[in-house]
Every structure is written in C-alpha cells, then in structure tokens.
Amino acid sequence: MILKELLKKHSVRHIEKKLLELFPEEEYFIKNEQYLNLIKKLLRIKPTKSNLSIIVEKVNSEFYNGVDVSGIDKSKEDNVRHGLQLTPWDIWLGMEIDKKSFENFSEIEVLAYCLDEMTYFGFDEEKKIKTSNKIKEMIEDIENNNTGNFKLVDAVEELNALKLEENLNELNKEK
C-alpha cells in the first residue's frame, strides 16, 4: 500500500488524535489546523512513484533509541536507510510502505509517524525544496571536487535556519 492509500483510509480527526498521543508537542499545530490543512492538501496531490519504500521501525542503538522513519531503495538489497525529511510530498505519497512497518505499529501509528517526519522542517514544502536543492548543489560541488564553495557548516546552518524560522513563525502566530 502506498502512503496516499493509507491516508485515505483514516479520518483527519483520528489522525490528529494519534498525532497528539504520540507527539504532544504538536498540539499547537493540531489546534491551529495545520495538520488538517496539510492532509487536505496531500489528498489533492497526485502521488509520484518512487524506488524508495517507507519503513517505520523501532531503533535501539548507541546513537538513537526510538522510532525511525526512513526510506529503503527497493531496487537494491543493501538495506541502506535514506532520510526522507526533505523529500517532496508527492514522492512521499507514492512510496510503498514496507510491510515490516506494520509488525510493530498500527496503520494509524505508521501514518502519524510519517506525517511527523514529513513536517520535521515545517509545513511549507516550497522552503523545504529550496533547502534540499541547496544541499544537492553542495553535494555536487563535493563530488566534482569543487569544494571551494562548500562548507559543511553552511549545510548544517541552512537546515538549522529552516527549522528555527519555522519555530519563530509559530511563536509569532501565538502572540
């Protein structure tokens, strides 16, 4: 099943209830209908097929303990996990959800974890795409040995600035 099919199976209120249960810090976004608006928007977007499938899994390692949402390339057998935070929403919607995700989580939990991951850098997809493009340019510079323009600090600052801007915007709305 692709993410959009899963999204269609559940009511917005049911999704918001599960988000609030798993992520109490998201209460502001739920009360201010940002998830409602996002879900309405997602339901209008045509999904784009992807070689990546979504996997939601419990992780217990020396670096992280919790739930991880990532992508696995179905065309490879290497099981390398790919971060999805900056993935465009149409691609998210077209990704198959790995069956292993449902071994430890209900459908609604998988959906809530995916929505949380999708909005990690905020609810403005255009800003996410711009940041993603900047990072891709930096990676290309590295791959082409044109590292004069690249500094890892710049990439980290760009991501932090995006997250900070989103947080500041939300604080200003509260006032």
Image (spheres, grey):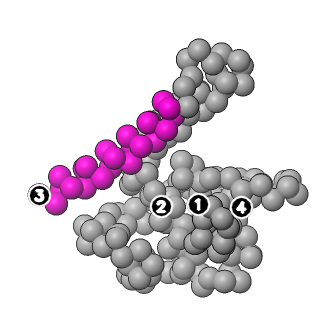
- Mark carried by residue 53: 4
Spot the residue most to the front. Answer: 62
Compare marks 1 and 4 and give the one earlier in the sequence: 4
For this view, does 161 lie left or right of residue 116?
left
Residue 94 image point, x, y percent: 64, 59
Question: Is residue 11 inside the magenta stretch?
Answer: no
- Mark 2 is surrounded, within 10 Å at the Cα level, by few (under 14), some (14 to 19) or many (20 or more) other residues, namely some
Measured in 3D between alpha carbons, the distance from the residue under mark 4 to the one under mark 2, in whole angstroms, is 18 Å
51 in relation to 117, above or below: above
Compare marks 1 and 3 and give the one earlier in the sequence: 1
For this view, does 128 lie left or right of residue 57?
left
Give the amino acid type for the residue marked by disc 4 in the picture.
Ser
To which residue does mark 2 refer? 42
Compare marks 3 and 4 and give the one earlier in the sequence: 4
To which residue does mark 3 refer? 175
Give the amino acid type for the residue marked by disc 2 in the picture.
Leu
Foreground label between 4 and 2:
4
Please state, as top left, top right, bottom left or bottom right, where the N terminus lies in the image.
bottom right
- Residue at (36% x, 76% y) in the render: 24
Task: Give the structural element (helix, strand or loop) at label 4.
Answer: strand
Please state, as top left, top right, bottom left or bottom right, where the C terminus lies in the image.
bottom left
Splitting the image into 4 quarters, where does residue 64 fall?
A: bottom right
Question: Is residue 167 inside the magenta stretch?
Answer: yes
The answer to whether any part of residue 60 appears in the image is yes
- Mark 1 is surrounded, within 10 Å at the Cα level, by few (under 14), some (14 to 19) or many (20 or more) other residues, namely many
